[in-house]
């Protein structure tokens, strides 16, 4: 999915700024997983920020509570805060990867539904390109939205949609869509 220069508002805008302004890294695999889950880069980096702050603040709050109760917490809570912040930064990555398999299965199931819908459209005498566009417009799932926008772009450029479907298949790592474009 192509990123635009429009800046999202609110917390998502803050996450976008963290990614763009500070230069926090985002791998192609992470981008692909975010696309598959229908999430934005800003949303992902806001989640990273929340987990990092939670890891930093929880031990610090415990130390402050100990101080308010008249006890000396020592340096351990501050070391735990640093470790918690570091661990918190990577929790969003783990959550993204853990949800990947479920979303991948849902995408493959969605592709099978897409194939069935295209066949039904073809049986109703729609052209191949029109059948694919109609089938893609049925669902609001992220992959279907991406297929629909890709087909619309191919239509506007007056080109065959199959190359665009192959590009989407590579972008999202969904080989079934590439096979469909070949057929």
Image: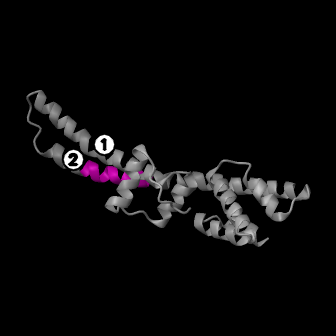
Magenta residues (range): 83-94
Q: Position of residue 94 (x, y in %)?
A: 43, 53
Which of the image's four quarters has the C terminus? bottom right
Residue 15 or residue 110, whichever sits in front: 15
Q: What residue sits right under mark 1 in the picture?
A: 54
Q: Position of residue 107 (x, y in %)?
A: 65, 55
User: Is residue 165 depicted above or below 105 in this figure?
Assistant: below
Residue 73 or residue 138, whichever sits in front: 138
User: Is residue 160 depicted above or below 36 in this figure?
Assistant: below
Q: Secondary structure at mark 1?
A: helix
Of badges 2 and 1, the one in the foreground is: 1
The residues tagged by marks 2 and 1 sit, at their Cα atoms, a distance apart of 12 Å
Quarter of the view holding residue 74: top left
Q: Position of residue 18 (x, y in %)?
A: 35, 55
Q: What residue sits right under mark 2 in the picture?
A: 80
Residue lying farthest to the top in this orientation = 69
State the mark number for residue 75. Answer: none
At x 68%, y 69%, the residue is 164
Q: Total number of numbered labels? A: 2
Label 2, residues with CA under 10 Å away: few <14, some 14-19, many ≥20: some
At x 22%, y 46%, the residue is 81
């Amino acid at each position: 999915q192509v990123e635009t220069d429009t800046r999202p508002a609110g917390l998502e805008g803050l996450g976008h700024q963290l990614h763009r302004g500070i230069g926090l890294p985002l791998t192609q695999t992470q981008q692909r997983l975010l696309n598959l889950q229908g999430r934005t880069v800003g949303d992902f980096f806001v989640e990273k920020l929340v987990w990092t702050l939670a890891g930093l603040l929880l031990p610090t709050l415990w130390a402050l509570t100990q101080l308010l109760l008249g006890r000396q917490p020592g340096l351990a809570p501050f070391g735990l805060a640093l470790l918690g912040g570091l661990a918190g930064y990577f929790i969003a990555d783990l959550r993204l990867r853990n949800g990947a398999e479920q979303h991948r299965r849902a995408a493959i199931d969605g592709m099978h539904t897409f194939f069935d819908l295209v066949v039904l459209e073809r049986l109703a005498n729609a052209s191949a390109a029109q059948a694919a566009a109609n089938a893609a417009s049925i669902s609001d799932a992220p992959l279907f939205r991406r297929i629909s926008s890709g087909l619309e772009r191919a239509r506007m450029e007056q080109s065959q949609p199959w190359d665009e479907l192959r590009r989407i298949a590579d972008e999202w790592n969904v080989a079934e869509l590439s096979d469909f474009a070949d057929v």
